[in-house]
Image (cartoon, rainbow, N blue to C red):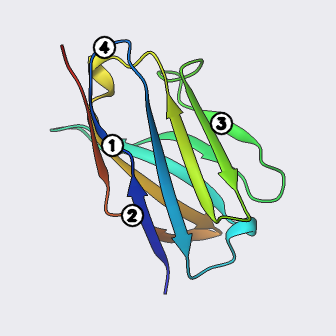
Amino acid sequence: QVQLVESGGGSVQPGGSLRLSCAASGFTFERASMRWYRQAPGKERELVATITGVTNITNYADSVKGRFTISRDNAKRTVSLQMNNLKPEDTAVYYCNAFRIQTLGWGQGTQVTVSS
């Protein structure tokens, strides 16, 4: 049974930083691409960052390039999203996703609020 559990969300002022983590179980973690999505109120869920399995190739949405960094620790079965220079428009629920050929599972989401 695939389980993805996010942590690390919270409230921060503009320009601040947060680090999200996602603990994974129930699938072959090192071979799966891991993704972070976000969904703001009234908007569609959008892909924020991806890190592939095995090769660890990363990709980012244009809106977060240079500010967010995705990384993974295969030994700990975790994927993280370091978010720096946060902006109010980054406010959303952030979801962890596991993908290999198809989506394997979603986390429950963690709220990130950026406000002064």
Q: Kindly identify which residue carries mark 4.
A: 14
Marks 4 and 3: which is nearer the front?
Answer: 4
Instruction: Give the number of the disc on residue 59.
Output: 3
Marks 4 and 1, how far apart at CA? 15 Å
SS state under label 2: loop
Q: Amino acid at mark 3?
A: Asn
First in residue order: circle 4 vs circle 3: 4
Outermost residue, bottom side: 1
Q: Residue at x 50, y 24 (%)?
A: 64
Q: Quadrant of the C terminus?
A: top left
Q: Is residue 45 left or right of residue 116?
A: right
Quarter of the image where one finds residue 74: bottom right
Q: Which residue is mark 1?
A: 9
- At 65% from the left and 36% from the top, the residue drawn is 59
Task: Return the x and y of residue 33 as percentages of the image width and height.
Answer: 66, 58
Vertical placement of 28 versus 44: above or below?
below
Q: Indicate which disc, 4 or 1, sits on the residue closer to the N terminus.
A: 1
Location of residue 34 with respect to 49 vertically, above or below = below
Sequence-wise, which precedes: disc 2 or disc 1?
A: 1
- Under tag 4, what secondary structure? loop
Q: Secondary structure at mark 3?
A: strand
Q: 11 and 70: which one is in front?
A: 11
